[in-house]
């Protein structure tokens, strides 16, 4: 015991120098704000899913002895019987399902891998669009699930969503309009190794949702030293023009919106809450939540997360992202997955459609770079900020209103365009202004 405590203390001392390697997964019973604060400030552990009943804590060997010494009641989550989880598909079976959906409707489905996991499993992404092999001038949307391998519900729901879209395109008007006007990218599993092992971390033992660049370092958006799955996602993000996205987790039921890493409010805080409420209102358990008012929460107000995908995506790439917790059980009974899909299906479709609440521009030439300053002129006058672009296309999701976009190319005169965003005209906002 003494040796383990010394190891834990040593890890605390050097925690600022490396990511936390997960060797113990514990659940502390009861909520004690001072305990949570002390553990979080040590930097040597990860806190997750704080509720009135307790919270999860992940860390190095010696963590359990440390909690015992502090007389904190807990249990080992790894010791929970997982025999009931055997019905879940393997990564190979998920691959077959995705390939079958692609084969069912290859006009709108294109499956590709953005790279491989630590153990060599493909990180599959399905592109869904009406001209799937063409780069169209359309807003780009993204779903990513299960970066925590033991939070499996999102993997199953995103596969079911893909299968429904392959089946219903052409017969369901809402899905058809969405596919015809959007470039949609869905990654059901960012951490297939973790899911195969039924663990939170990747095969190296690291939490992928603490391994993205933190927004406190504006110059830190680099893949250097990060886990291979994070590197692949970062390169994928940099190659696209995503403007709205969500990542799926499990452990409770709520929509979590930025910021996660700071108590400061996002510049579009009210708008993000509106989008989050829109998702939650269509989910019966979310909208009736007793734990989270309205089924939503600000990330940092819940608990602080550094190095998460949500803040990284929103801050560095103008890709407004929320985190959706889908189920109280991380591995619910497989027979219950259809009911979870029923609860989330309309919410998932709704949220994808919100990508069209925005506007942007497209140059008729390549190798374009510069900045765009966005100012809302109605119903209020407000500067949304200045954003860099280094491709011929730029798009931003924005609240309803009238806007002026002042576009400045390097070594060229500025161009000013006027755009309008109407939340009631999802597919007829005009979206893009073409610039010669």
Image (cartoon, rainbow, N blue to C red):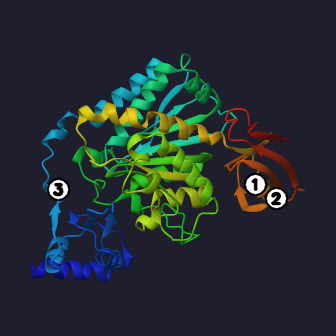
Mark 1 vs mark 3: give the one in front: 3
Instruction: Give residue 94's quadrant in the image.
Output: top left
- Contact between marks 2 and 1 (CB within 8 A): the answer is yes
- Considering the numbered disc 3 on the image, is that residue within a helix, a strand or a loop? helix
The one nearer the camera, 202 or 365, is 202
Q: Which of the pair 378/133 is nearer the observer?
A: 378
Which residue is depicted at the point 85% across and 48% down?
Answer: 417
| Above or below, 222 relative to 162 | below
Q: CA distance from mark 3 to mark 2?
A: 55 Å
Residue hosting label 1: 369
C-beta proximity under 8 Å, tags 3 and 2: no
Give the Cα distance between marks 2 and 1: 6 Å
Q: Earlier in the sequence, mark 1 or mark 3?
A: 3
Residue depicted at x 83% and y 56%: 406
Q: Residue furthest top?
A: 171
Quarter-of-image position of residue 428: top right
Q: Position of residue 19 (x, y in %)?
A: 36, 69
Which of the numbered marks, if any, corresponds to residue 410? 2
Quadrant in which residue 308 is drawn: bottom left
Estimate the x, y position of residue 262 in percent, counting from the top left: 51, 70
Badge number at residue 78: 3
């Amino acid at each position: 015991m003494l040796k383990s405590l010394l190891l834990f203390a040593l890890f605390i001392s050097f925690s600022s120098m490396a990511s936390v390697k997960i060797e113990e997964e514990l659940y502390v019973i009861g909520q004690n704000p001072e305990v949570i604060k002390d553990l979080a400030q040590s930097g040597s552990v990860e806190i997750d899913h704080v509720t009135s009943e307790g919270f999860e804590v992940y860390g190095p060997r010696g963590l359990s002895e440390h909690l015992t010494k502090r007389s904190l009641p807990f249990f080992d989550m790894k010791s929970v019987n997982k025999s009931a989880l055997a019905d879940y598909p393997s990564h190979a079976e998920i691959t077959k399902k995705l390939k079958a959906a692609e084969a069912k409707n290859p006009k709108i489905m294109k499956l590709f891998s953005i790279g491989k996991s630590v153990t060599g499993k493909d990180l599959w992404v399905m592109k869904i669009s009406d001209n799937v092999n063409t780069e169209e001038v359309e807003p780009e949307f993204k779903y990513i699930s299960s970066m925590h391998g033991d939070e499996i519900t999102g993997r199953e729901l995103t596969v079911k969503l893909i299968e429904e879209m392959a089946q219903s395109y052409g017969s369901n008007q809402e899905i058809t309009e969405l596919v015809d006007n959007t470039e949609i990218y869905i990654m059901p599993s960012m951490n297939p190794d973790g899911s195969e092992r039924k663990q939170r971390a990747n095969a190296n033992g690291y939490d992928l949702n603490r391994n993205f660049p933190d927004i406190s370092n504006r110059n830190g958006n680099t893949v250097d030293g990060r886990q291979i799955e994070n590197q692949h996602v970062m390169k994928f993000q940099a190659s696209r023009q995503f403007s709205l996205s969500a990542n799926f987790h499990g452990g409770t039921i709520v929509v979590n919106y930025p910021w996660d890493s700071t108590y400061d409010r996002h510049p579009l805080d009210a708008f993000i809450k509106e989008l989050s409420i829109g998702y939650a209102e269509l989910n019966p358990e979310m909208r009736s939540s007793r734990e989270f008012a309205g089924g939503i929460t600000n990330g940092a107000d819940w608990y602080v997360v550094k190095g998460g995908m949500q803040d990284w995506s929103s801050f560095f790439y103008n890709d407004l992202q929320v985190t959706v917790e889908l189920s109280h059980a991380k591995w619910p009974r497989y027979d219950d997955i259809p009911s979870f899909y029923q609860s989330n299906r309309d919410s998932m479709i709704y949220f994808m459609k919100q990508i069209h609440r925005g506007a942007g521009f497209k140059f008729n030439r390549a190798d374009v770079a510069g900045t765009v300053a966005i100012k809302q002129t109605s119903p209020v006058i407000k500067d949304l900020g200045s954003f860099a672009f280094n491709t011929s296309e730029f798009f931003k999701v924005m609240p309803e209103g009238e806007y002026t976009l002042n576009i400045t190319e390097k070594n060229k005169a500025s161009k000013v365009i006027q755009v309008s965003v109407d939340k009631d005209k999802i597919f007829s906002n005009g979206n893009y202004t073409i610039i010669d």
